[in-house]
Amino acid sequence: MTKRTDLGGSFTLPGTSVTVNRMGYGAMQLAGPGVWGPPRDLDAAVAILREVITAGVNHIDTSDFYGPHVTNQIIKRALHPYPDDLLIVTKVGARRGKDKSWIHALSRQELIDAVHDNLRNLALEKLDVVNLRVGGVMGPSEGSIEESLTVLAELKRQGLIRHIGLSNISPEQLAEGQRITEIVCVQNLYNVAHRNDDGFIDERVQSVTVVEARSSSNVTSGDADAGCACLASAALTQHAADPRHIFSRTSSRESQGCNATTSSRNHRQS
């Protein structure tokens, strides 16, 4: 029997009543090699998901362009009907090419279709959190996010999305996004090796929870999403005494499968 452990404490998404454990599970590698097609062992993928929930994880990061569609279908198979306290955070703004490439998909219709794909493949009537993926391979790209974010805000008003987050963005894009709708989380490339957002984090400590779900240590080509799936939750609200205390969870890409992950606490040295 899996023992439930202390997963680094918990934090509440700002402006909401949603509280999750700091250690989550990044589901990208549930799909096959290259985050494409089915996994080599579907039963093992299902077992991993059930194991992490049993261990106390109540926060899963996913997207319907993982597979594509495959990862969400595995989550549904393993966990539906979902536990009441499980938060599923998905992502839109990209799609997969026939050559397995990662392509921006930020038009109005592409975003609408992506939300409905996530709803269908997760068997949900409303998505807990949808992150709008804005940037490129290794970080943000310049430009306004108003047009694409407005689409998600409309879908939120229609009742299809509960909360909205942003992914691969700059501080300026966050400020723009907050003028359009409430932003509950940010998902950027940030880890012990990539510290470009130190200033960004320090600036936003009182206003947003930053969730980092990328590790590029093994990225060779393509989208950063094709790299090692990891989830780091930095409670950058009143719940964190020091915003530089980052609680992270990483998974190895070497397996190209579905590994449970370990937790580490990294403290930025000044």
Image (tube, helix red, strand yellow):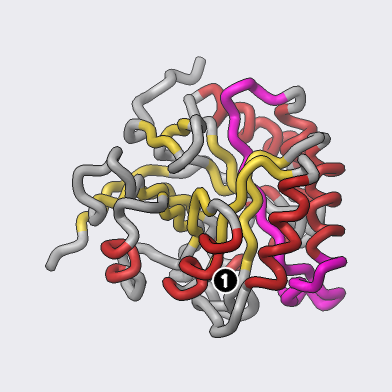
Q: Position of residue 86 (x, y in %)?
A: 59, 29
Q: Quarter holding the C terminus? A: bottom left
Q: Which residue is mark 1?
A: 224
Please tell me which residue is depicted at 70% across the width and 53% down the height of the picture: 63
Residue situated furthest top in the rendering:
1
Q: Is residue 83 magenta?
A: yes
Q: Secondary structure at mark 1?
A: helix
On screen, 220 above or below 55?
Answer: below
Left or right of 90 on screen, residue 112: right
Which of these two is toward me, 132 or 86?
132
* Rendered position, 46 above or below 160: above
Specify whether residue 72 is in view.
no
Q: Residue at x 63, y 34 (%)?
A: 49
Residue 7 appears in which quarter of the rendering?
top left
Q: Position of residue 100 (x, y in %)?
A: 78, 73
Residue with the most extreme front position: 179
The percent coordinates of residue 109 (x first, y second) are: 87, 66
Q: Is residue 150 magenta?
A: no
Read off the magenta span. 82-110
- At a point 71% along the width and 66% down the height, the residue shown is 93
Dot 1: within a 10 Å radius of its alpha carbon, few (fewer than 14), some, or many (20 or more) residues?
many
Q: Quadrant of residue 52?
A: top right
